[in-house]
Image: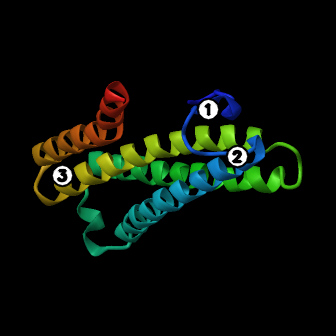
Amino acid sequence: MAGVDIRAQDIPGDGRDETPIERADRNWDDILQELRVTLTGTQVMTGFLLALAFQQRFTDLTVAQVDLYLVLVGLAALSTALGVAPVILHRTFFRHPAKDHVVILGNRLLLAELIVVGLLAIGVTGFIFDFVIGGIAGVVAGAISTVVVVALWVALPQLRKATA
């Protein structure tokens, strides 16, 4: 729904009798709740990644594993930045008549955050399997993680939209 005016999201007969401002407030609250969920997952994965560098076996990583590790740390940092960005938007436009703008941008940032979190989850899974079992296991685990993320985050919602 990126770029869609939130006022155009009225669904006749949805049982809601709210003004555009009330709808924007509700949509913003939904975004904040979703960000809380994603940021918790990001914090767990980031904590794991940061702690890993201080483990004794970190020196056992291959060059490719170190490269993947650094990419994952970068994704974790990007995920954190994306997850906090809507809060900065809210602070920037606090007490300004820009709630529609904040909700639309917040939605886009949240979608970007979800993509990065998905990539991070896939990468961390592949990385762990690669280190613990070996390269082939890492690739298989990464592929399975990709299928699961795409199935749950893309296919399932699309299936629901198609049957609605």
**Mark 2: amino acid:** Glu
Looking at the picture, the colour scheme in use is rainbow
* Callout 1 touching callout 3 (CB < 8 Å): no
At which x and y percent is residue 79?
52, 51
64 horizontally vs 30: left or right: left
Q: Earlier in the sequence, mark 2 or mark 3?
A: 2
Q: Residues within 10 Å of mark 1 (few under 14, many from 20)?
A: few
Residue type at numbered disc 3: Asp
Kind of element beneath mark 1: helix
Query: Which of pointers 1 and 2 indicates the residue nearer the eye?
Result: 2
Q: Is residue 105 visible?
A: yes
20 over 72 or under it: above or below: above
The residue located at (56%, 30%) in the rendering is 1
Between 102 and 59, which is closer to the camera in this rendering? 102
Return the x and y of residue 132 as percentages of the image width and height.
15, 60
Quarter of the image for residue 3 reads top right
Q: Is residue 119 above or below residue 56?
A: above
The first of marks 1 and 3 along the sequence is 1
Q: Secondary structure at mark 3?
A: helix
Q: Which residue is mark 3?
A: 130
The answer to whether residue 63 is visible is no
Res 45 label: none
Along the line of sight, the residue nearer the viewer: 23 or 89 = 23
Q: For mark 1, what is the residue? A: 9
The Cα–Cα distance between marks 1 and 3, rounded to whole angstroms, is 45 Å
The residue under label 2 is 18
Secondary-structure class at tag 2: loop
Q: Residue furthest right?
A: 96
> Alpha carbon of mark 1 to alpha carbon of mark 2: how far?
12 Å
Q: Using a 10 Å C-alpha cutoff, classify the residue at mark 3 as few (fewer than 14 neighbours), some (14 to 19) or many (20 or more).
A: many
Q: Is residue 159 left or right of residue 42?
A: left
* Three-letter code for the amino acid on which mark 1 is drawn: Gln
